[in-house]
Amino acid sequence: DADVTQTPRNRITKTGKRIMLECSQTKGHDRMYWYRQDPGLGLRLIYYSFDVKDINKGEISDGYSVSRQAQAKFSLSLESAIPNQTALYFCATSEERTGRAETQYFGPGTRLLVL
Amino acid sequence: QQQVKQSPQSLIVQKGGISIINCAYENTAFDYFPWYQQFPGKGPALLIAIRPDVSEKKEGRFTISFNKSAKQFSLHIMDSQPGDSATYFCAASRNSGYALNFGKGTSLLVTP
């Protein structure tokens, strides 16, 4: 979805390096998410944010940190990358709908290789 | 700790056949059950979703069947087409304010 952009699209880094993945959205949504996808493991939630001042850990937050710089921007950092963080990373957004479940809109993904 | 279990992991169906993907959950607080479709090189996109107050929802060739007592739901793709070849994820969540719990995904290949 072009309304959710991720940079970079591909990245190769070395063990121990710090790396930041960025996500921007023009959908005007308050809620943003970071997932990682691994073959056979599906999509696992790393962090999510329901507004600029709200950050929550997901299922697999260890080794990751996030920053919500603005409503439209949500960055994921790997403080010291390790090879098992090699994965496809997705950012997603959703619009708050009180009392109703929300559709999540995913970006195109960032493919990360840690050597 | 997988809250949503999905099967099969992969599926091959001939063109015109029916593709069936199954999911099961344990948390009875879940009340929203979407299916996402992902094509290679793309992010997942919502395909169809159901709430537990109905047992079936149909949109075109795609149908969700929901069995609340068994805590199971499934996606049926009728008249499967090669263009349906993709990875399908089921998910579940509580109502607004909670994150989605995804299954591990099913890779569907529809052969000509």
Image: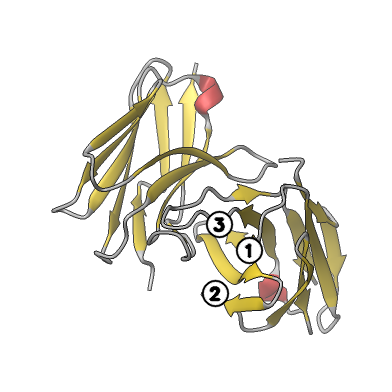
Front-most of residues A86 and A24? A24
3 vs 1, front mark: 3
Helix, strand or loop for disc 3: loop
Measured as percent of width and height from the top left, residue A70 is found at 80, 67
User: Are the residues under marks 3 and 1 on the same chain?
Assistant: yes
Give the residue at x 56% y 67%: A45
Tell me the kind of residue under disc 1.
Answer: Tyr
Image-based side of B72 in relation to A35, left or right? left
Tell me the kind of residue under disc 3.
Answer: Glu
Chain to which mark 1 belongs: A
Residue placed under numbered mark 1 in the picture = A33
Marker disc for residue A96? 3
Front-most of residues A115 and A35? A35
Cβ atoms at labels 3 and 1 below 8 Å apart: no
Residue A80 position by quadrant: bottom right
Front-most of residues B23 and A71? A71
Tell me the kind of residue under disc 2.
Answer: Gly
Total labels drawn: 3
Marker disc for residue A58? 2
User: Are the residues under marks 1 and 2 on the same chain?
Assistant: yes
Give the residue at x 64% y 55%: A93
Measured as percent of width and height from the top left, residue A94 is found at 60, 54
